Image (cartoon, helix red, strand yellow):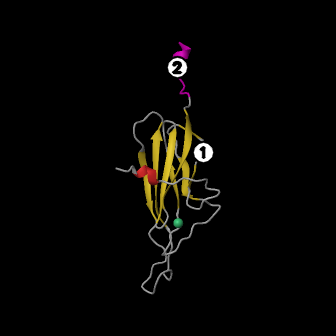
Amino acid sequence: MTNIGSFIQEADWRKEKHSPLIKAPSSVAAGELFELTVGLSPEIVHPNTTEHHISWISLYFHPVGAKFPHQVGRYEFSAHGESVKGPNLGPVYTHHQVKTFVKIDKAGTFYALSLCNIHGLWGAEMKVDVTVSEAPTGDKML
Ligand code: FE2
């Protein structure tokens, strides 16, 4: 049996229009919401037409030391100019980018998977560290 992971393509997003790009702070405070954007390379724009488009992006988080990743979100891009008049004559297109807010309590890696309807699965990752603020304790006063 072939592992489906062997079909996930990876490339530098500066050179490949299919590569997902995760934008988030490299370090966040434990338990505090932060903004995370996931989309495709902003350098080389991927087409968004009825015939050729990004169908979805899935985002996962794998905490350091955990056995499995957790799914954070799955974002469907359903409108690509479809119309009864013909392809690319429809009134709406969904751009393949999502902004969301997440919080984590442990460092780990975010993984993004995107699917181009013609060119398959593409993946990218980003590590995020977590800082833990020291809670004030009265014990030191004793
Ligand atoms: Fe494509």
Q: Earlier in the sequence, mark 2 or mark 1?
A: 1
Closer to the camera, 131 or 115? 115
- On the picture, is 35 further left or further right than 14? left
Give the residue pinned by disc 2.
138
Q: Is residue 127 magenta?
A: no
At a point 40% along the width and 36% down the height, the residue shown is 67
**Image position of 79 (left or right of 19):** left
| x and y, in percent, of residue 109 in the image | 51, 42
Identify which residue, 135 or 11, lies in the foreground. 11
Would you say the magenta stretch is mainly helix, strand or loop? Answer: loop
The span shown in magenta is: 134-142
Q: What distance separates the C-alpha of mark 2 from that of mark 1?
A: 32 Å
Q: Secondary structure at mark 2?
A: loop
The percent position of residue 120, horizontal first and vertical second, equals: 47, 61
Residue occupying the far left of the picture: 1
Would you say the beta carbon of the disc 1 residue lies within 8 angstroms of ligand 1? Answer: no
Identify residue type, mark 2.
Gly
Would you say the residues marked 2 and 1 are in contact, meaning their CB atoms lie under 8 Å apart? no
Give residue 68's quadrant in the image. Answer: top left
Q: Residues within 10 Å of mark 2 (few under 14, many from 20)?
A: few
Assign a secondary structure to mark 1: loop
For mark 1, what is the residue?
Answer: 25
Give coordinates of residue 36: x percent, y percent.
Answer: 55, 51
Query: Image point 56% across, 27% down: which residue?
Result: 134
Q: Residue at x 55, y 60 (%)?
A: 18
* Residue 30 vertical position relative to residue 23 in the rendered view, above or below: above
The image position of residue 37, as x and y in percent, is: 55, 54
Q: Which one is in front in this view, the residue at disc 2 or the one at disc 1?
A: 1
> What amino acid type should be assigned to the residue bearing mark 1?
Pro
